[in-house]
């Protein structure tokens, strides 16, 4: 698994961006990620055709167990973000 630093390094090697500094590329990556988060928070989802769909899903309250003690505990209802890869992305990964 790679991290953001490795992503920035990979992008910086693109021929079209050879004159762009890694700091500027990092800023662009950060702005993109911040934009995705803001749109998903505001609208509940974001579809990027060919890449995938981010969607906010509600979770119900449920009972869980503390793995150390085995004691039952209540888990409150909440929200989670899911991601479903688009067809083009799925084909590329295969």
Image: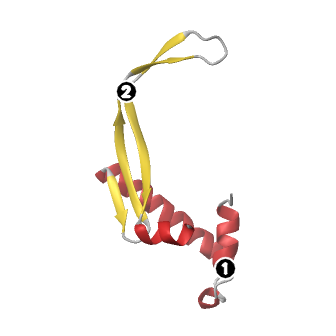
**Image location of residue 17, percent across then percent down:** 61, 86
Residue denoted by label 2: 77
Q: Quadrant of the N terminus?
A: bottom right
**Image location of residue 77, percent across then percent down:** 37, 27
**Residue 37 image-quadrant placement:** bottom left
Q: CA distance from mark 2 to mark 1?
A: 42 Å
Task: Name the mark nearer the viewer: 2 or 1.
Answer: 2
Q: Quadrant of the C terminus?
A: bottom right
Mark 2 or mark 1: whose residue is earlier in sequence: 1
**Dots 2, 1 in contact, CB < 8 A:** no
Q: Nearer the viewer, residue 4 or 75?
A: 75
Residue extending farthest to the front is 94
Q: Nearer the viewer, residue 78 or 51?
A: 51
Residue denoted by label 1: 12
Helix, strand or loop at mark 1: helix
Q: Residue at x 44, y 72 (%)?
A: 88
Q: Is residue 35 above or below residue 74?
A: below
Helix, strand or loop at mark 2: loop
Disc 2: CA contacts within 10 A as few (<14), some (14-19) or many (>=20): few
In the rendered picture of this protein, how many numbered marks are placed on residues? 2
Q: Residue at x 65, y 68 (%)?
A: 7
**Residue 86 image-quadrant placement:** bottom left
**Image location of residue 39, percent across then percent down:** 36, 57
Q: Residue at x 66, y 79 (%)?
A: 12
């Amino acid at each position: 698994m790679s991290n953001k630093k490795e992503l920035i390094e990979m992008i910086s090697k693109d021929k079209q961006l050879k004159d762009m500094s890694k700091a500027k590329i990092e800023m662009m990556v950060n702005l993109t990620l911040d934009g995705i988060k803001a749109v998903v928070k505001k609208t509940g989802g974001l579809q990027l055709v060919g890449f995938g769909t981010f969607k906010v899903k509600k979770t119900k309250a449920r009972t869980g167990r503390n793995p150390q003690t085995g004691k039952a505990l209540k888990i409150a209802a909440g929200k989670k973000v899911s991601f479903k890869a688009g067809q083009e992305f799925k084909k590329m990964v295969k």
